[in-house]
Amino acid sequence: MTDDINETTSLLRAKKPTPLPKLQLAIIMLIQICEPLTSQSIYPYINQLVSELDITGGDERKVGYYAISDHKGRKPILLVGLFGSALSMICFGLSRTFWALVISRCASGLLNGNTGVMKSALGDLTDSSNRARGFAYVPLIWATGASLGPFIGGTLSTPQDRFPPMFGGKFWGDFPYFLPCMVVGGFVFVSFIVVLVFFKESAPTRTGAIKGRDSENFNSSKVACGPLPLKDLFVFPIIISISNYVALAFLNIVISALLPLFLAMPIEIGGLGLPPKTIGLILATYGAITGVFQVSFFSLLVRRFGEKRVFLTGLSTCLPIFALFPIMSVIAKASGLTFMIWILVGCVLCFGAILDSSFGAIFMFITASAPSNSRGTVNGISQTTASISRAIGPALSTSLFSFSVQHNILGGYAVYAFFFVLSALALFLGRRLPNQVWEEVDE
């Protein structure tokens, strides 16, 4: 009897979540917030250029950085990425020609592969018992940076006009956008110092494998101590995880492109005709709802329902989101901006927050599907393919919006029907995921 009690107690203790390494996690989140700060702080004053540079910034070449992190460790690549981001921001603020702007942004893309490496490091620092809690912070930190970035850019640009007593010199007249770039670049450089001094290398040195469905492809006895060759990573667990991530990233960026367009377009051509200030408030509210939802509920939902159900539930919200666009348009055309419109806009924002929880869930699938010593390479493949889908999504969705309206296809709402069908197909793909993430094995 005593042995049974001891065994039960031991099992209960084994299920207790591992405490998160708070300092290392905080440093990872510090690295994470640098990404939206550097990418979005320039939105208020150079939106069109940024949208072009996001497509030509060299994302496809970042796979090399992710793979290098498996060989040389996460820390050196994170340091190179932070230094490159800080340097590019300073150069951007000092640029006087179009090509100087282009070169500074391209340099940022070429030198910075931190997004995938950060996820690899987060996977290294967590295990199956606490990974949901760790990944829950990622969208919150991103939303925070995405809100602070434009605020810094809009508030600190042209300081000679806003704060003439402090910034009235010729330099600030010649370089009106240097101040926000300097502030963001300075923050990134401080992050560089913090990583250099306090971050502990997280890249594993032992053999990693997975077991579960198709686990024979990851027989640990055949895996060397170094990262696996690229061809050996194209197995079902990795392929299905990355495929679902790409589908999610595509639908998410489509919604991100269509929502502000829908809010801004005049009512008579299928939008709501809202002013920029109101649109900004709506998008800021969306960021706040998303951040609070992820931190408050994501890890609880994963523990209660599992990664697959959380992923599919989040992904399924694409269906009502795309359905609500034409419904809101019809109501607005018939009755104007009634109270019902604002209720439906709120529903879209709440559905969007639930949709974002799918990212944390699929990141957990990707992390578990990869051998620990090839995690950087797998994250590199996922980030590269997702970047391609994110480059296609905005152009395709906005073009289909215009085409639907101009040719009055399905009353101008064909774009929403098209992506509604794609969302249903994405759900079918998501059902191919296992009910639980693959168990990680490190030998």
Image (cartoon, rainbow, N blue to C red):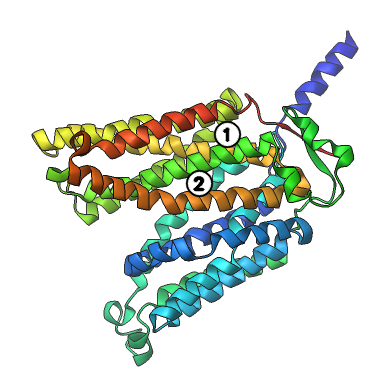
Q: Nearer the viewer, residue 279 or 311?
A: 311
Relative side of 169 to 217, left or right: left
Q: Nearer the viewer, residue 325 or 56?
A: 56
Total numbered labels: 2
Residue at far top of view: 1
Three-letter code for the amino acid on which mark 2 is drawn: Pro
Position of residue 98 measured from the top left corner of the image (x, y, whole percent): 39, 79
Q: How crowded is mark 2: few (under 14 residues within 10 Å), some or many (20 or more)?
A: many
Q: Residue at point 27% right, 80% down?
A: 161
Q: Residues within 10 Å of mark 1 (few under 14, many from 20)?
A: many
Residue at far bottom of view: 170
Q: Residue at point 61% right, 53% down?
A: 116
Q: In which quarter of the image is residue 173?
A: bottom left
Mark 1 highlights which residue? Answer: 299
Three-letter code for the amino acid on which mark 1 is drawn: Ser
Mark earlier in primary sequence (1, 2): 2
Q: Can residue 143 be seen in this view?
A: no
Position of residue 77 measured from the top left corner of the image (x, y, whole percent): 68, 64
Q: Quadrant of residue 165?
A: bottom left
Position of residue 34 measured from the top left corner of the image (x, y, whole percent): 53, 62
Q: Residue at point 54% right, 72% down?
A: 107
Position of residue 181 measured from the top left corner of the image (x, y, whole percent): 45, 74
Q: In which quarter of the image is the C terminus?
A: top right
Q: Residue at point 30% right, 45% down?
A: 400
Q: Is residue 53 visible?
A: yes
Q: Quadrant of residue 252?
A: top left
Label 1 to label 2: alpha-carbon separation: 13 Å
Mark 2 highlights which residue? Answer: 139
